[in-house]
Image: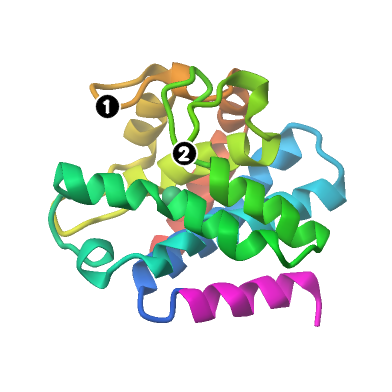
Amino acid sequence: MTPKSICMLVARAAHAHDEQTLQHSTRMIKTSSLLAESLGLPHEDIELVEHGALLHDIGKNVLPDVVIMKPGRLSPQERRLMTEHTVYGHDLLKDVRQPVFDAAAQVALCHHENFDGSGYPRGLSGLEIPLPARIVAVADVYDALRSDRPYKTGMDHRSTMAVLLRGDDRTSPSNFDPTVLAALSRQDAAINALYAAEQA
Ligand SMILES: [Fe+2]
Ligand SMILES: [Fe+2]
């Protein structure tokens, strides 16, 4: 089996009861890959980013279904519990001791860290955050904004790009690595086409 097929098997098993997270993670493979490619990463590193994207939310499978499947917005207490998926994901992946899973463990742990230090779980900032996690963070928010949820309708590509590049009341461009945001701008058309094909 290739590392890619092993990661897909792990993701399918982990999210077997949570189709929404599996779809979200699967879509992020290609978006993260386009960002990594635009940043000039070598092929092997692009693959590590792809596997990290696929497995980034694996820790959610440890959380109670009532939180994961909640159709409405989370309460402050549920949100606190949800932040733990980063640590759980890291703990699940870190002991495999293979480069693919080492990188994925770092992405799982750090994909909610913000470049300006306002993220979680450790409040890392700037280059303290591993590059694959800085890439996946942008793909993650892009996909979350595009997606329908029971309590919201997904945004279109233009509005999503505007939130990431210029911010809104919940998201600031300072949350993200500016070099990854520049890569997002360069891949604007490719990412738009990717999601248009998904929705067709
Ligand atoms: Fe996450
Ligand atoms: Fe995510």
Amino acid residing under circle 2: His
Residue beneath disc 1: 170
Residue 170: % across, % down = 27, 27
User: CB of residue at label 2: within 8 Å of ligand 1?
Assistant: yes
Q: Residue at left 37%, top 74%? A: 19
Name the residue nearer the viewer: 172 or 155: 172
Look at the image and say whether residue 9 sits in the magenta stretch.
yes
Q: Residue at left 57%, top 32%? A: 184
Residue 150: % across, % down = 15, 59
Local secondary structure at mark 2:
loop
- Residue 7 vs 105, above or below: the answer is below
Name which quarter of the figure residue 159 lies in: top left
Q: Which label sits on residue 197?
A: none
Name the residue nearer the viewer: 139 or 160: 139
- Residue 110 vs 3, above or below: the answer is above
> On the picture, is 81 further left or further right than 151?
right
User: CB of residue at label 1: within 8 Å of ligand 1?
Assistant: no
Magenta residues? 1-14
Q: Which label sits on residue 112?
A: 2
Q: Residue at left 64%, top 54%? A: 105
